[in-house]
Image (spheres, grey):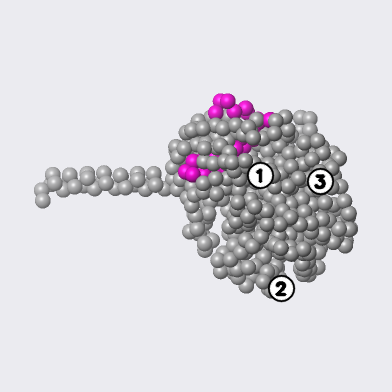
Amino acid sequence: MNYKDSAYEKVISVFLWAMLATCASVSAQSIVYSEPDRDDPRTLNFEVVGKIGGKFLIYKNARDDHFFSVYDSEMKLSAKVKADFLPSRTKILGTDFLAYPDFTYFIYQYQQRNIYYVMAAKIGPEGKIMGEVTMLDTTSGIGYTANNRIYTIVNSEDKQKLGAFKISTRNEKEHVITSCVFNKELNQLEKVRIPVPMPDRNDYLGEFGLDNEGNLVCLRESSVAANESVIKVSLVIKSLGSINPTISEVKVKNLFLDDIRIKIDNLNKKILITSFFSKQKRGNIDGLYYTLWDKKNGTELLNATTVFTDEFRADVKGEGSTKTAFNDFYLKNLILRRDGGFMMIAESAYMNSRGNNFNRWDMMNRSPLYNPYFGSGFGMGMGMGFGGYYPYGSGFNAYPWGSPWGMNNMGGNNVTRYFSDNIAIISFEPDGKMEWSNVIRKTQFDDNTDNYIGYGLMNSGDQIRFLFNIQEKRNNVLTDQAMSPQGQIDRNPTLKNLERGYDFMPRHAKQTGSRQAIIPCMYRGFTCFAKIDY
């Protein structure tokens, strides 16, 4: 081989390596943006419904206008369909979506005169209604004009069951749940009134869930006083087809619980109840409480606590004391493993207005990034004070507190500053033993809006990606960090193909494939959407 041939091969080798590197970079991550729809008002409400029939469906609402925008794989707008089946001159008080591969159910609530309706429409990949609307339930004789939803929509994990329920609190000694359960075709399986005794003065119903068999599950909580920590918890299970619920007290062991969550493990037929706890009233958060309940036998399998170590507290704290390190943390995600273990993800979130900081008791033990009334049943609500019905949510990843997508201002010219800081992750083995913990560090804040802070999740099975903005020179830059099942976190470089002028809202992202997500963003004051493929 002569020198020229050797030099030629080197050039080819360098070229091939460059091509491989380019291909690897392209395959690693790509972003495609939709064009801002200039016809959309700047006060637009929206929700990413998901990937339906290969198209991306997004619901939009501005005042009394409701429509579905359909985007192709390149995020080009292919159709914009007005939801003309909705009642005219009527305020829609709640919307929920249950998406399948080839259609989605659009569930909406409204009031006309003294009758309140919850309806469902089947929407196809082109954004058009399929068939006729279905009435799920009504409530008559309402003597007031409702400003928020009175029904909560829940669905089973396999999406084969759908529940719509409301709660009457007229009798403070016995709250009554009216539950309607449907199959995938929206055929009603049952409609039943469920009386739940409220023996203590500060009893109320907590988070709800629906298992794959159609059984309704919720918590009855008893607090020290209104908006205070919980000292007693009971598990309420109403089996499909039965009349009366079974109510079982859960051992709390002289703890003060806060931000209680429930998660149904359909694979292992168990129910997980978990919460932060303190050892004294209004005390600092000391650790995590969790109970595992066997649905089949109706017995408690595990009741344990994990006290956070000083090392872990020092790892998660911002600028404060290690004693108060978890006081601004709220449970955001519970992820179940096939072996019965689980992972808890919590985020630090707080706010202030006129220099006054609001603590978790001011927030009624809920994150300031939380709102029960917008989105697909995300978040969990408290009593509405009508003396009638109050709504609850069914999960995590809550929507903003206040206006759904616009400015949040607490009166006059006040500036409300929202903060969202570190993320704490703890993994537990099936026997409840803490397996590992880790922290994702971030510092975020914004004034009068919380749209651009917080994080979104993408779960691809082999790893979980945390998507969030980092602030560089007063600009938000989208970044991601990937976590392995063993808790190792890879701090990836800034995402490629980020164009200037786009402000991402990762907390409102919707995963649409194993390695794909749609993230809302703002461009020059208009809402648009970015598709990210890994």
- The correct choice, above or below, for 475 with respect to 297 in the image is above
Report helix, strand or loop for mark 2. Answer: strand
- Where residue 91 sits in the image (x, y, percent)? 73, 34
Q: Amino acid at mark 1?
A: Thr
| Upstream in sequence: badge 2 or badge 3 | 2
Determine which residue is flagged by label 3.
Answer: 384
Report the mark closest to the observer, 2 or 1.
1
Label 2 CA crowd tier, 10 Å (few <14, some 14–19, many 20+) = few
| Upstream in sequence: badge 3 or badge 1 | 1
Give residue 299's mark: 2
Q: Is residue 210 magenta?
A: no
Determine which residue is flagged by label 1.
Answer: 134
Range drawn in magenta: 37-64
- Is residue 5 toward the left or the right of residue 510 in the image? left
> Residue lying farthest top?
38
Q: Amino acid at mark 3?
A: Met
Q: Mark 3–mark 1 contact, CB under 8 Å?
A: no
- The correct choice, above or below, for 38 with respect to 102 in the image is above
Label 1 CA crowd tier, 10 Å (few <14, some 14–19, many 20+) = some
Q: Identify the residue shown where x is 49% and y is 47%.
A: 516
| Upstream in sequence: badge 2 or badge 1 | 1
Report helix, strand or loop for mark 1. Answer: strand
- In this view of the protein, can residue 489 be seen by the observer? no
- Where residue 47 sits in the image (x, y, percent)? 61, 40
Q: Amino acid at mark 2?
A: Thr
- The correct choice, above or below, for 10 with respect to 262 in the image is above
Q: Is residue 62 magenta?
A: yes
- Is residue 5 toward the left or the right of residue 304 in the image? left
Front-lying residue, 357 or 169? 169
Q: Identify the residue shown where x is 65% and y is 52%.
A: 187
